[in-house]
Amino acid sequence: MRKLDELNFKYPFYGEPILTQWLLKDGYKISSRRVRRLMKLIDWRTIYREPKTTISDKTSYKYPYLLKDLKIVRMNQVWAIDITYITMERGFMYLVAIIDLHSRFVVN
């Protein structure tokens, strides 16, 4: 369990087949069924892209894309923002980036 917990923090995107191979190489006598059971016990879900994460509501108002016909030709003309959620060892944090769309420079 300790070894699986360490691997969970280092490689949260690895699934049961790769973890089983790693543990077998390290000398543990373990089957893939047991690895799956232990992963379920510590509530470890492999990180992967899930299909259809955004399902639009047809009845709600759809805001127009205001930059559709705008030619972005110089720096500081248009900025964009990106927010992402990062899981930490204790809790989580948000990472926010402000990006200049012309140069792709991270402003802040």
Image (cartoon, rainbow, N blue to C red):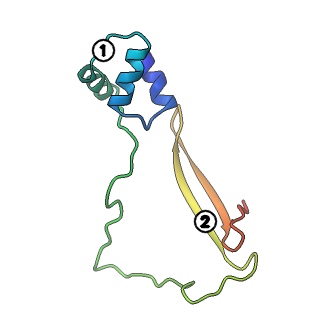
Residue labelled with disc 2: 81
Task: Tell me which amino acid carries mark 1.
Answer: Ile
Which mark, residue 13?
none
Which mark lies nearer to you, 2 or 1? Answer: 1
At x 33%, y 30%, the residue is 16
| Left or right: where 78 falls relative to 47 | right
- On the image, the x and y values in percent for residue 48 come to 39, 46
- On the image, the x and y values in percent for residue 46 come to 37, 38
Of all residues, the one furthest to the bottom in this rendering is 69
The answer to which of 65 and 101 lies nearer the viewer is 101
First of labels 2, 1 by sequence position: 1
Residue labelled with disc 1: 30
Task: Tell me which amino acid carries mark 2.
Answer: Ile
At x 29%, y 28%, the residue is 40
- On the image, the x and y values in percent for residue 106 come to 70, 61
Pointer 2 local density, CA inside 10 Å: few below 14, some 14–19, many at least 20: few
